[in-house]
Image (cartoon, rainbow, N blue to C red):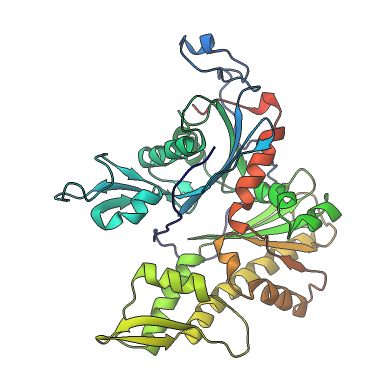
Amino acid sequence: MTTTPGNASAPAPDGDSSLTESHAGPVHAGPIHARPAHARPAHASPSDAGSSTAIDVGTSTALRVGIDLGSRRTVFVASDGGERLEFDADTTCTVVGFPKRGVIPGVLPSDSDALVGDEASEMQIHLDVTWPVKDGLVEDVGACRLVTRHVRELIDPDGMRPMWGVVGAPVGASGDHLDALRATMVGVLDRLVVVPEPCLAAAGMPEDADVRSAAETDPGGSRLIVDIGLARTDLCLVRGADSTVEHHLRIPHAGEAVDDDLVRLIRKQHPGLDLGRRTLQEIKERHAFVGGGEREARVPIYADGRPQTLDLAVPIREACERLLAQVVGGIEDLLARHRDGSGASGARDPVRTVVLTGGGSRIGGLCERVEETLRSSGWQEASVLRPADPVRLVARGALRMAETMPEASWVEPA
């Protein structure tokens, strides 16, 4: 089974830069909400749905799916009878585009009222685009349904297989936000379980070669998951084999904040130079780094009516160092709470593993600088790791849970 979308990306909404806490008390890795008592059981037959043409949604025939619904990109993985399915591309842009008035016929790839995913990203100059997920939360249910149904088509183009899926949600998401998330999965997943994203990241560690050893060496220990996303950085202290979230901090300073700082710093170094958002993202993704030493970031651009090559290492480093300071401050806060026993279960053994994930974790030298800073501040046992594939860690953890989730835990999306 294969799909053929590309991997284009495009800018999304901004966030602010304050430090906020969004969780109090432990959260476990099981479902974070329950459906009403009248919800149809997981083993219900097609006749229970009131339709003789309904597909069999039973557990024996269902594809198992893990979905990470992100603000910029949605990642999905799936298995059939425990065998992992392979796709040409397992991510798509979380974006929907509606044709602008006056677009010449034939310019867009189809006559559809809306383009979705990577196709919408690639053609957005001709579209009015909307990004239905912001800060990890669904803000436009209708548009997001188009994205999730697109994901289903990518997984099962024929639409004949039932799909049971685990989907991640931010820790501390409100009931209304969870309802919105469930609504986007109606007609997409036949059964659903929603689990806090840091628990899914922890569950995905055995799937990744670069962090697997930490999960296997100390399966019941505490680890700190740092997810550096588009508009926010979530820091979660996850404890034990059941992935209980002991503490959680949200910092609205992440990839977009780095972009904003980079714009300001480049303009300060090169007054009058105005780079587009997509160009900035490409520069950051190719050259982003922290740390000392001599380093160049030579970028070919067209400015002042002629092609030039500029060295943007200084503003790139400074913008990324600002993110580094925010991340280290949040980590030290959570480690101090854990050390002082201010969580629900009192004092615990030291946290030895910090896992950086999300797109921002790919900044060059970030793991090394975070570890160096923590150890110089007295956290001598801290080991900072980055998965080989940080973008897919949550989705892979979701699939692992989907493959082992008890049948009684599954509910219908609506």
Q: Looking at the picture, how far across and down is residue 134, in whole percent?
A: 44, 52
Quarter of the rendering containing residue 210: bottom right
Quarter of the rendering containing residue 328: bottom right
Q: Is residue 204 left or right of residue 381?
A: left
Q: Residue at x 36, y 49 (%)?
A: 119
Q: Looking at the picture, how far across and down is residue 278, in whole percent?
A: 38, 67
Would residue 30 be visible to someone looking at this image? no
- How many discs appear? 0
Q: Nearer the viewer, residue 152 or 220?
A: 152
Q: Is residue 196 left or right of residue 302?
A: right
Q: Residue furthest left?
A: 102
Would residue 194 be visible to someone looking at this image? yes
Q: Residue at x 34, y 50 (%)?
A: 120
Residue 229 lies, with reference to residue 397, above or below; the image says below
Residue 275 lies, with reference to residue 251, above or below; the image says below
Q: Looking at the picture, how far across and down is residue 150, in whole percent?
A: 42, 39
Q: Is residue 283 left or right of residue 201?
A: left
Q: Looking at the picture, how far across and down is residue 207, in whole percent?
A: 71, 50
Q: Quadrant of the N terminus?
A: top right
Q: Nearer the viewer, residue 54 or 409?
A: 54
Q: Residue at x 24, y 40 (%)?
A: 111
